[in-house]
């Protein structure tokens, strides 16, 4: 059974998932990993969603305010052995619902152009590719996406 839990970055189950995420991203991003890491600190993120399967934390995602009315989706991850079960879509859906509850009208996110399954998930969930925003402007390996939430 899958349980989705809303929490924050102080949750003790989050660091292991983030370490696995960062390890995977470092393998993909190579020398660019430090550039991206500086924008992915979790210590002050107030809105975190964790997915638990049979009591074990198997996935996570977070959101933070990017600018008024715009939430940025961050730190989306599902353990490799739990992929293909729709867990990421459930995490994303809960993050979007939470964003609406917090009065955000738009969600944005950044992913890598080598992360085809992630791009597919976001497109399937209604996100559209948009010009790179903020710190990702001019970063060729970034794919930025946007979705109107209401």
Image: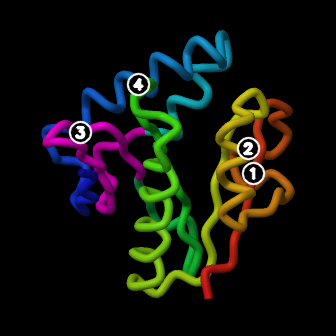
In this rendered view, identify the residue nearer to me: 79 or 128: 79
Classified by dominant secondary structure, the portion drawn in magenta counts as: strand
Label 3: which secondary element: strand
Q: Which mark is residue 136?
A: 2
Q: Work out how far the residue at label 3 is from the one at label 1, CA to CA, in angstroms.
A: 27 Å
Q: Residue at x 66, y 18 (%)?
A: 29
Q: Disc 3 marks which residue?
A: 57
Query: In the rendering, at what x and y percent does residue 50 appear?
Result: 29, 50
Q: Which residue is mark 4?
A: 81
Whether label 2 touches label 1, CB < 8 Å = yes
Which element type, helix, strand or loop, lies under badge 4?
helix
Give the CA separation, mark 4 to mark 1: 27 Å
Question: Relative to the observer, which residue lies in front, 69 or 60?
Answer: 60
Tell which circle, 4 or 1, labels the residue nearer the N-terminal end: 4
The Cα–Cα distance between marks 4 and 2, rounded to whole angstroms, is 30 Å
Image depth: mark 2 or mark 3 in front: 3
Do callouts 4 and 3 mark residues in contact (Cβ within 8 Å)? no
Residue mark closest to the camera, 4 vs 2: 4
Instruction: Report crowding for label 1: few under 14, some 14 to 19, many 20 or more residues within 10 A (C-alpha).
Output: many
Q: Helix, strand, or loop for circle 2?
A: helix
The residue segment tinted magenta is 41-61
Q: Which mark is residue 42?
A: none
Distance CA(mark 2)–CA(mark 1):
8 Å
Asked whether the residues under the numbered discs 2 and 3 touch, taking CB atoms below 8 Å apart as contact, a structural biologist would say no
Q: At which x and y percent is residue 30?
A: 65, 11
Nearest-to-viewer mark from 3 and 1: 3
Q: Residue tagged by mark 1? A: 144
Secondary element under disc 1, as helix, strand or loop, is strand
């Amino acid at each position: 059974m899958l349980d989705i839990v809303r929490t924050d970055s102080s949750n003790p189950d989050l660091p292991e998932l983030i370490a696995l995420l960062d390890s995977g991203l470092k393998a993909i991003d190579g020398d660019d990993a430090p550039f991206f890491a500086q924008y992915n600190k979790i210590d002050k993120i107030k809105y975190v969603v964790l997915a638990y399967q049979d009591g074990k934390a198997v996935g996570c995602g977070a959101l933070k305010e990017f600018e008024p009315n715009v939430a940025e989706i961050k730190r989306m991850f599902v353990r490799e052995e739990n992929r293909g079960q729709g867990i990421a879509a459930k995490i994303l859906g809960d993050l979007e619902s939470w964003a609406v509850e917090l009065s955000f009208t738009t969600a944005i996110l950044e992913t890598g152009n080598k992360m085809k399954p992630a791009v597919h998930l976001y497109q399937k969930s209604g996100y559209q590719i948009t010009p790179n925003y903020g710190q990702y402007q001019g970063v060729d390996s970034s794919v930025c996406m946007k979705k109107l939430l209401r």
